[in-house]
């Protein structure tokens, strides 16, 4: 640092420094404070949004369980999707809407909801895997078996490999492709035995395998049982 002989020289040096750097220093401080407060404000906004979405989602669940005061579940689900489209609650709401559509035989509506979820969910997440699995079943129920199989072949099924194999078996069975259905069911059963698999009704799977093993050879029976769009 410079050594100044008089106080006047020090004051003059400080004045020159301020003229040269003061404004930029103040601006930098203001920006830093603004960023800090802005970040805190954004975090609070995000927290408030999540809390509001959670409350609305709880109302929807209450309505689904029969609480009359909660309101109409479909309307609440649509409200969550509209108000908080970027939230996980909106994805869950759309999944519920898809299930309601299937119950009402509105397969096109169910497909639209599931595709919306896939457009929002993180690729490879449980949400995306379940939505993709259900979409394949809905598409198969609409009679588009090859498209359903293509959907099941997309991406990594992760902990849902057995459920995907089971769904493939159902699609094959709906087409009368018994050998392929049996092989898919056997794969699902083997994956369940290895552990870590989710969403498989093992007694139902075993019943399907047993039914196929006891059926007469292809061509000696009528049409195969229809695929179930609601099973995962």
Image (cartoon, rainbow, N blue to C red):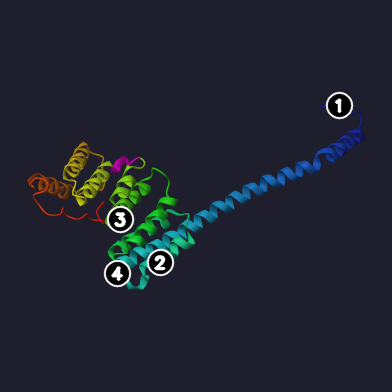
* Foreground residue among 221 and 40: 221
Sequence-earlier tag: 4 or 2 = 4
Residue, disc 4: 66
Sequence-earlier tag: 1 or 3 = 1
Residue, disc 3: 138
SS at mark 4? loop
Q: In this picture, is 187 found above or below 224?
A: above
**Residue farthest front in this picture:** 219
- In reply to whether residue 176 is colored magenta, the answer given is no
SS at mark 2? helix
Sequence-earlier tag: 4 or 3 = 4
Describe residue 177's horizontal placement relative to residue 210 as left or right. Answer: right
SS at mark 1? loop
Q: Nearer the viewer, mark 2 or mark 3?
A: 3
- Quick check: marks 1 and 4 in contact, CB under 8 Å? no
Q: Residue at x 28, y 41 (%)?
A: 161
The residues tagged by marks 1 and 4 sit, at their Cα atoms, a distance apart of 83 Å
- Range of the magenta residues? 156-160
SS at mark 3? helix
The residues tagged by marks 4 and 2 sit, at their Cα atoms, a distance apart of 14 Å
Q: Nearer the viewer, mark 4 or mark 3?
A: 3
């Amino acid at each position: 640092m410079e050594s100044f002989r008089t106080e006047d020289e020090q004051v003059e040096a400080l004045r020159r420094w301020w003229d040269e750097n003061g404004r930029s220093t103040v601006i930098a401080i203001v920006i830093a404070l603004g960023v800090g407060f802005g970040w805190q404000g954004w975090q609070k906004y995000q927290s408030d949004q999540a809390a509001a979405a959670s409350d609305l989602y709880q109302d929807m669940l209450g309505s689904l369980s029969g609480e009359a005061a909660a309101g109409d579940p479909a309307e609440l689900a649509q409200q969550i999707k509209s108000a908080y489209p970027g939230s996980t609650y909106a994805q869950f709401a759309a999944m519920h809407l898809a299930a309601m559509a299937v119950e009402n035989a509105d397969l096109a509506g169910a497909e639209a909801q599931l595709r919306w979820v896939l457009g929002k969910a993180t690729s490879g997440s449980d949400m995306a895997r379940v939505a993709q699995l259900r979409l394949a079943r809905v598409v198969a129920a609409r009679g588009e078996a090859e498209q359903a199989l293509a959907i099941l072949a997309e991406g990594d099924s992760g902990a849902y490999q057995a459920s995907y194999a089971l769904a493939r078996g159902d699609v094959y069975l709906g087409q009368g492709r018994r050998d392929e259905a049996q092989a898919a069911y056997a794969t699902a059963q083997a994956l369940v035995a290895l552990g870590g698999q989710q969403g498989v009704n093992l007694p139902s799977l075993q019943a399907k395998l047993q039914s196929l093993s006891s059926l007469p050879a292809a061509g000696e029976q009528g049409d195969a049982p229809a695929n179930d769009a609601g099973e995962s």
